[in-house]
Structure formats: structure tokens, C-alpha cells
């Protein structure tokens, strides 16, 4: 059964990692996928081709979600190209890790703008469309770090905690129009980025997780699929922890 047959979805930051995993799973379930990338054009175009071959409409857009103006332009283009928007997944994000005493202002500002302000920008940009049709699902990518904090990631934790507060507020604002807004808080997810880390370090992290493994992009994608589909039609304002039990 295809849970998103004919639905139009926007995913920010989908040229790699979790975003790519979400795009693939959604396309397999019949969704038309509009997704953004910032600089990785080749992987983005390759993904666009891969998704199209699954029999759905797919298009990559170069867009900076941290820019309010670019977000508005993106949504207008997607509406023109796809004819509608049913689901928004705010996935774009970066890290600039360091201890507070070594963290520069630019590193703090960049993480807040790309991780948190982008969620405001994109949600604001799609709001009118969702209100008009009186339905929609917004899914914001938070993090286990946004729930419990982490040394050396004050900027990242602040941005992800902010997403949780934003999500709960928007759920209250838009619920009466049948628009749901939820967040996912991933734990340790193994992507291209973690492949660059020392294997001993990664294994140490795995051992600290009750399920004894890192998550995959597909684990997060499946959680997104649930929150995007009618299977979660009575769920809003929720933070779904997908972390293998590392925090309960």
C-alpha cells in the first residue's frame, strides 16, 4: 500500500544523508518530491533522476532555506511546477561544533539561521497554501541534542530545542484548520558524515545505545512517513524520539 499516493512534498536539504533517505521512501510510497540543495548539485540531480524513475514527479531546487526571500520564491516555484503542497519537511541543517569558550559568534549565528530560522521561513511560506486547502502536515527535524543538550554543541542544541518550541506553537495555531505540525528528534544516525569518523569512536557510541546500533536514514524516513500520512491524522504537537533507546 502506498501511503502518500499523489501527495506533493517539499523536503529541504535532501541531497544527502537523512534528507535523501526521506525522499527515497516518500517516492516509493507514491509522493511527488520537490527537494532543495545548497551546493551539491551533482548528487541532487542524480537523486532527481532516481526518484523520477520510481514513477513520481521529482525536482531539485537550489535554494537557501535560511533566506526568507528564497523560501518564498521556492514555494511559489513548487506550486507552479507541482500544482500543490501537502507536506513540508524542514530537514536542512548544519553543525559548527565547539566548546563555548572557543565558539565564534559567526558559528553560533550560522547554525541558528540555517537550522532554526529556516523552519520559520519555510513554514511561513507554505502556510497560506495549507490554510486555504484546510489540510497539511509539517514535519520539523529536531535532535536528541535539542531535548537533552550536549557539551560542545550549544549552538546546535539551541537551534534544535528552538525547533521543538516552534513546532508545539504552530500545532496550536494551525490545528483548527486541520494542519498538523510535529517534530522528529533523531539520535545517532549513520550517514556519509559519520563514515568519516574513527571507527573506534563510532563503535563506542553504538555500545552506548540500548539497541546497540546507530540509526539509518531510512529509520528517520519511516518516522516521517508515519507523520506525513493519514496514519497519524490525530497526532500534532508531538516530538517523536527516534534514537534506539539512548534517551527515553
Image (cartoon, rainbow, N blue to C red):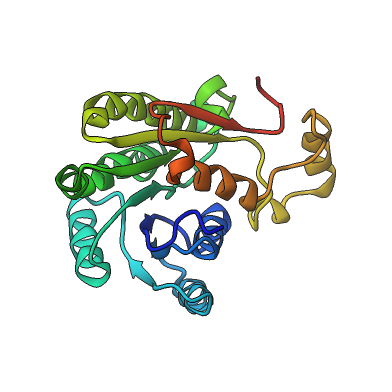
In the image, taking residue 96 as reference, residue 159 lies left or right, namely: left
Quadrant housing residue 57 = bottom left
**Residue in view at x 31 percent, y 57 percent:** 64
In front: 106, or 230? 230
Q: Nearer the viewer, residue 5 or 11?
A: 5
Instruction: Quadrant for the N terminus, please.
Output: bottom right
In this rendering, the answer to whether 21 lies above or below 244 is below
Q: Quadrant of the C terminus?
A: top right
In x, y percent, where is residue 245? 71, 27
Q: Can you say whether 219 is above or below 6 in the image?
A: above
Left or right: 186 as drawn, with respect to 238? right
Work out whether residue 197 can be spotted: yes
Q: Residue at x 24, y 45 (%)?
A: 121
Please name whichever residue, 200 or 119, is drawn nearer the observer in this view of the structure.
119
Residue 184 is left or right of residue 114, and the answer is: right
Could you tell me which residue is drawn at 24 percent across and 60 percent down? Answer: 84
Would residue 38 be visible to someone looking at this image?
no
Amino acid at each position: 500500500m502506498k501511503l502518500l499516493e499523489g501527495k506533493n512534498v517539499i523536503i529541504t536539504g535532501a541531497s544527502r544523508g537523512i534528507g535523501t533517505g526521506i525522499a527515497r521512501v516518500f517516492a516509493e510510497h507514491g509522493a511527488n518530491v520537490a527537494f532543495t540543495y545548497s551546493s551539491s548539485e551533482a548528487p541532487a540531480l542524480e537523486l532527481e533522476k532516481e526518484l523520477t524513475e520510481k514513477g513520481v514527479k521529482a525536482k531539485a531546487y537550489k535554494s537557501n532555506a535560511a533566506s526568507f526571500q528564497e523560501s518564498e520564491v521556492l514555494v511559489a516555484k513548487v506550486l507552479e511546477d507541482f500544482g500543490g503542497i501537502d507536506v513540508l519537511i524542514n530537514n536542512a541543517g548544519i553543525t559548527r561544533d565547539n566548546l563555548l569558550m572557543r565558539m565564534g559568534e559567526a558559528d553560533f549565528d550560522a547554525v541558528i539561521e540555517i537550522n532554526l530560522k529556516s523552519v520559520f521561513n519555510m513554514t511561513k511560506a507554505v502556510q497560506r497554501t495549507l490554510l486555504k486547502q484546510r489540510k497539511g502536515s509539517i514535519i520539523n527535524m529536531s535532535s536528541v541534542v535539542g531535548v537533552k543538550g550536549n557539551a560542545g554543541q550549544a549552538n546546535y542544541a539551541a537551534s534544535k530545542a528552538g525547533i521543538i518550541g516552534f513546532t508545539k506553537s504552530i500545532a496550536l495555531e494551525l490545528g483548527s484548520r486541520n494542519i498538523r505540525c510535529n517534530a522528529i528528534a533523531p539520535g545517532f544516525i549513520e550517514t556519509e558524515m559519520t563514515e568519516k569518523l574513527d571507527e573506534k569512536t563510532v563503535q563506542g557510541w553504538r555500545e552506548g545505545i540500548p539497541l546497540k546500533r546507530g540509526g539509518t536514514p531510512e529509520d528517520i524516513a519511516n518516522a516521517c512517513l508515519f507523520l506525513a500520512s493519514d496514519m497519524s491524522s490525530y497526532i500534532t504537537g508531538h516530538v517523536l524520539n527516534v534514537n534506539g533507546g539512548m534517551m527515553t
